[in-house]
Amino acid sequence: MLQSYQLFQKASPELVDEILRYMRDEERAVYKSALAQLAAGRKLRPAFIQKRPLDKQLAWFADSLRLRSGDSIAEQLLQVWLLKSKKAMLVCFLDAMGIEHDGEGSVEDLPDAFDTDKLKEGVGKTLEEHPADAVKVYLHLFQTQRPGGWPELEDLLENDERLAFG
């Protein structure tokens, strides 16, 4: 099961850039807070990072999120990005799986198991309607939402080439 920092390691540079730019432009408070936490963890002042040109700032941010020490911040950013900017994708998967949600992609009660055929169908539908890179990140993050994840989803993540990272 991949942790959030590992998702940032494996995701395409374009997707990482999309996530960080979304956070910077649309979720400014979360972006600044995450940047401050990462900077403090590396014994830097946030202002030092914020004064850098944007491309260098984003590169530093991405590199920091790829470290094990940045895992909790990486998870928070991924959750915010998915829930705020990828609602349609989350709803598509949850609806296909028959998982009750709030209409925005948030779930209170997760199932104990998945029907393998229904899971394959739900993943296929989600991949047809949404960018594969975002779907891969979502499903890997979804797998971490239950201790030990779901064996049916783990099998799919490990063996379905559509869900493999480059």
Image (cartoon, rainbow, N blue to C red):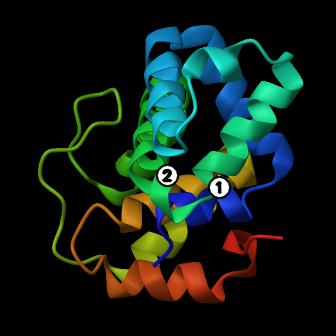
| Quadrant the N terminus occupies | bottom left
Q: Residues within 10 Å of mark 1 (few under 14, many from 20)?
A: many
Among the two numbered marks 2 and 1 on one chain, the one whose residue lies closer to the N terminus = 1
Residue 57 in view, yes or no? yes
Q: Nearer the viewer, residue 92 or 35?
A: 35
Mark 2 belongs to which amino acid? Gly
Secondary structure state at the residue bearing disc 1:
helix
Please name the residue shown 56% across and 24% down the image: 45
Q: Position of residue 158 (x, y in %)?
A: 59, 86
Q: Is residue 112 left or right of residue 36?
A: left
Please name the residue shown 59% across and 49% down the image: 65
Residue linked to disc 2: 70
Q: Kindly check if marks 2 and 1 are in contact, taking CB atoms under 8 A apart as contact.
A: yes
**Could you say which disc has been placed on residue 51 in the image?**
none
Q: Position of residue 10 (x, y in %)?
A: 72, 65
Position of 96 relative to 115 (above/below): above
Please name the residue shown 43% across and 43% down the image: 73
Residue linked to disc 1: 8
Q: Nearer the viewer, residue 39 or 24?
A: 39
Mark 1 belongs to which amino acid? Phe
Position of 104 relative to 122 (above/below): above
